[in-house]
Every structure is written in structure tokens, then in C-alpha cells.
Image (cartoon, rainbow, N blue to C red):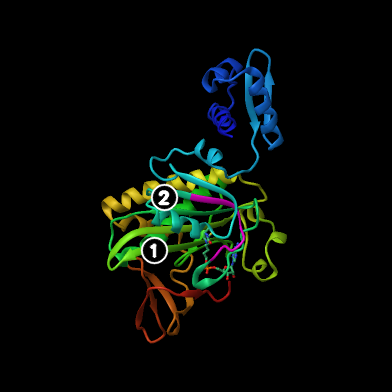
Amino acid sequence: GKMRQHLLQMLIENGDTFVSGQQISDELNCSRTAIWKHITELRKEGYVIEAVQRKGYRIVSSPDRVTEHEISARLKSDVLGKNIVYEESVKSTQEIAQKLSYEQKPEGTLVVADEQTGGRGRLGRPWQSPKGTGIWMSLILRPEIPLQKTPQLTLLAAVSVTKAIYKVTGLHAEIKWPNDILINGKKTVGILTELQAESDRVHAVIIGIGLNVNVTVEDFNEDVRKIATSLKIESGNETKRADLIAAILEEIEVLYREYLNKGFGLIKLLWEGYAHSIGRRIKVRTASQQLEGVAKGITDEGILLLEDDNGKVHSIYSADIEIPGT
Ligand code: BTX
């Protein structure tokens, strides 16, 4: 209920500091007995809460949950994630975010799920989203930019996620154009950008992020096991998903503001710094053709430039790329 969430928020915000029973009962306008009842329930949910006479309560450790309160209590952003919709199990957070966007929910609205039963990648491919192990979320943005610039936001998101992973875990991830983030050559994050637009007017860009956080090898299906990895598999440590979600939203917010004010320049530079495929020989599969050559870089629009063996440079707008030897 509302009161338990409020109590949790107070405890999380106070960190290591005790919150007295008096403070709580004043703020929540409830009795000491009611507080005790809620503390008992929170303990059942996995929170370890210390209770000390004349000092009060404090959280010693929290379960790894991605509920609105777990995220909000850690979030320092101004706009992104101010409105959070948490669901325990959904088909796809993209689907929900699309619907909320049509309902005019504000920019920065975030949909997060503990599990997806029908998570999707590009071109209708499935995205495995096992329960309680990863970040499966969709963010609504409403940038005033022309349609053809929207792919830049995928790159912006990829840079932000890569920075956040490093900040929270110390792991160095690399970006494979356009939308994969790899650690040691294996897929750790997938980003799916979907649009709501009319002629040239962009109503919304829905950025879907799937991040394997505490996923174990056994959690992945047979077919994905060879190509995928997680932060836990790579580092040996568990990460609190809510910490990482907050860090990602903060990084996106900073770069998104920079992008709207000053354009793609800085993001392009950062992206190139994290790029896995630039300068390497790659195979490209687009809807209409297959090409092979060296990835030369990206344009100011975020388009990939590929030089084939005859020295001809192709602009690749959207494709799957394969890096032989990975
Ligand atoms: P993609 O089309 O680049 O990648 C999909 C492919 O990645 C699959 O065909 C499979 O081979 C592999 N794969 C599937 N699941 C995983 C996984 N958990 N880890 C690594 N590799 C995997 C990438 O599409 C974009 C994915 C976006 C997912 C987010 S989650 C929140 C939001 N909701 C939703 O339905 N999709 C997005």
C-alpha cells in the first residue's frame, strides 16, 4: 500500500542514518503499532531492517528490486524517470510505453518490468528477459527533431548505457553499431528504438533497453548462450538493478540535454571512443543487400560508413553487422 511505500522511501532516503519512530509516525500520521506492522511486511519482502530502541529504524540491505520506489529513491535526474510505471511481468515494456505515449504521458516516463514474456528485438526477433535478473525498460522521449535524425538517439542511449555500466561496475563495454553493447565480444545490452511519427513530425521516440545484469549462463536459452553475456558473468558480482537504472537515466539526461542544445557532435565523439567495430572488417546485411568491407566510422547523422574492397564507400542506415572472428 501507499503507506508502506512512503515508509520505504523515508528509510531509503536516510541511508545509514536511523529514522525515529516519532519521525515516521508524524510524517505518515500513523501509530507505532502500524509502523511495526509495515516493517514486518518489508522484512518479508527481503529488506533487512535494523530496529534499535530510542534510535529507530534503518535499512541494512535491500533486495534487488526495480519497483518505482527503489528507483526513485536513487534517482537524481530532473525529467527522466519522474514518472515510473513498474510491472512485475509483462509481454513487452515497449508495448506499454507505446500505449502510454499515445495517451500523452509526459517525456521521461519510464516503464520497467521484472520480467518480459514477449520481449522483442529488431525485425521481430525475440529478446529473452528472465525474471528478476535484468533491466527490461522503455523510456518515452519527445524530442523536437526531424525524423531522419532519430537514429542518433539510439547511439546516444548506447553511449549513456556504456558510461553507466562503467560507473556502477567498472566493466568496460564496447558498442557495436548501431544498437548492441558488448563485453568481451558478447552481447550484454540490446537497444530498440521505436517511433511515433506523422509525416515528418516526431511525436515520440520510445527507447527500449534490455540489459543482462545478474543473468546466469543457465538463464539464457541454448541459442543465445553462445553469443550473450551479463554483468554478473563478466564481473563475478551482482549489481543492484535499481542503482544501474538510476545511473543510466542520469547519463541519458545529461547527453540528451547536450544533444538538444548543441547537436550530435559530442555524442559522436563519445560513441567513437566506445566503438567496437570501427576500423575493423565487417559484414553488413541490409534489407536489400549484403556487403563486406571496413567500417570507416559514422557520419554526423549517425550513419555507418563502410568501405568495400573496391574502395567504394557505402552509407548504411540500418543493418545487422557481423564482425568475423567474434
Ligand atoms: P536485436 O534484434 O539486435 O537482438 C535480438 C537477438 O539477440 C535475438 O535474435 C537473439 O539472438 C539475441 N538475444 C535474445 N535475447 C538476448 C539477451 N537477453 N541477451 C543477449 N542476446 C539476446 C536488440 O535486438 C534489442 C533488444 C531490446 C530489448 C528491450 S527490453 C525492454 C524493451 N522491451 C522490449 O520488448 N524490447 C526492449
- In percent of width and height, residue 270 lies at 39, 56
Figure quarter occupied by ligand 1 = bottom right
Q: Nearer the viewer, mark 2 or mark 1?
A: 1
Where residue 115 sits, quadrant-wise, is bottom right
Find residue 136 and report its image quarter. bottom right
Residue on which disc 2 sits: 252
Q: Within 10 angstroms of label 2, few (less than 14), some, or many (20 or more) residues?
A: many
Marks 2 and 1 sit apart, C-alpha to C-alpha, by 18 Å
Residue 158 seen from this side? no
Point out the image quarter for the C terminus: bottom right
Over which residues does the magenta segment extend?
Answer: 111-120
Image side of residue 60 versus residue 251, left or right? right
State whether residue 234 is above or below residue 151. Answer: above
Q: Main secondary structure of the magenta part?
A: strand
Q: Position of residue 132 (x, y in %)?
A: 65, 50
Q: Residue furthest bottom?
A: 310
- 239 in relation to 1, above or below: below
Assign the N terminus to one quadrant of the image. Answer: top right
Q: Which mark is residue 233?
A: none
Residue type (three-letter) at the residue carrying disc 1: Leu
Q: Residue at x 44, y 43 (%)?
A: 83
Q: Residue at x 66, y 27 (%)?
A: 39
Amino acid carrying mark 2 in the image: Ile
Mark 1 Cα-neighbour bin, 10 Å: few <14, some 14–19, many ≥20: some
The one nearer the camera, 45 or 258, is: 45
Look at mark 1 in the image and give the residue it sits on.
Answer: 195
Q: Secondary structure at mark 2?
A: helix
* Side of 195 where 84 appears, left or right: right
Q: Is residue 253 above or below residue 221?
A: above
